[in-house]
Image (cartoon, grey):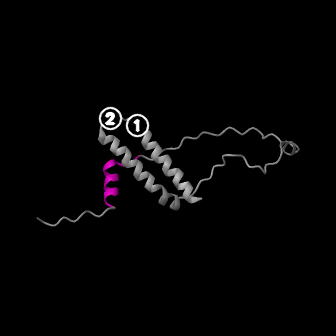
Amino acid sequence: MLLWDVLARSSAVLAAAALTAAALRGRSAALRHAIWACGLTGALAVAPLSWILPTWHVPLVPALTMAPPAAQRAVAPSAPMPPAAPLAVTETAMPAPAAPAAWRRAWWGQWPRPHHPAQ
């Protein structure tokens, strides 16, 4: 099952690359080569990514075990919800943003500086 899934996804990636390359037929060969390179790379990446990343199943056909509509109508209607109370809006002071130079110093201070030997 997994083989057919990977084959279908890789084919979809290659089909998208083919359609894009066909749409850009009058453009430069370098652009079309980049499109095909990205398409082939994407098609090759489908298999490892499908094993690593989590799956997401979207039901295309509703389940056949659903209750019939008559059984659903037999349930008593729920009571309407009371209206929500209006929210009180209060103003809060936002802290002043830090100076950009201080932010840059804090950010770059986290990373070690590369060591360049004396020339």
Q: Which is more foreground, mark 1 or mark 2?
A: 1
Main SS of the magenta part reads helix
Q: Give the labeled residue for mark 1.
A: 22
Chain part drawn in magenta:
97-109
Residue 75 seen in the figure: no
**Nearer to us in this view, 117 or 40:** 40
Question: At numbered mark 2, what does the secondary structure look like: helix, strand or loop?
Answer: loop
| Residue type at tag 2 | Arg
Mark 1 or mark 2: name the one nearer the start of the chain: 1
Residue 57 seen in the figure: yes
Q: Residues within 10 Å of mark 1 (few under 14, many from 20)?
A: few
The residues bearing labels 1 and 2 have C-alpha atoms spaced at a distance of 10 Å
Q: Is residue 26 magenta?
A: no
From what the image shows, is residue 13 above or below residue 20?
A: below
Q: Residue at x 49, y 49 (%)?
A: 11
Locate residue 78 relative to residue 41 in the image: left or right. right
x%, y% of residue 34? 34, 45
Q: Tell me the tag on residue 27.
A: 2
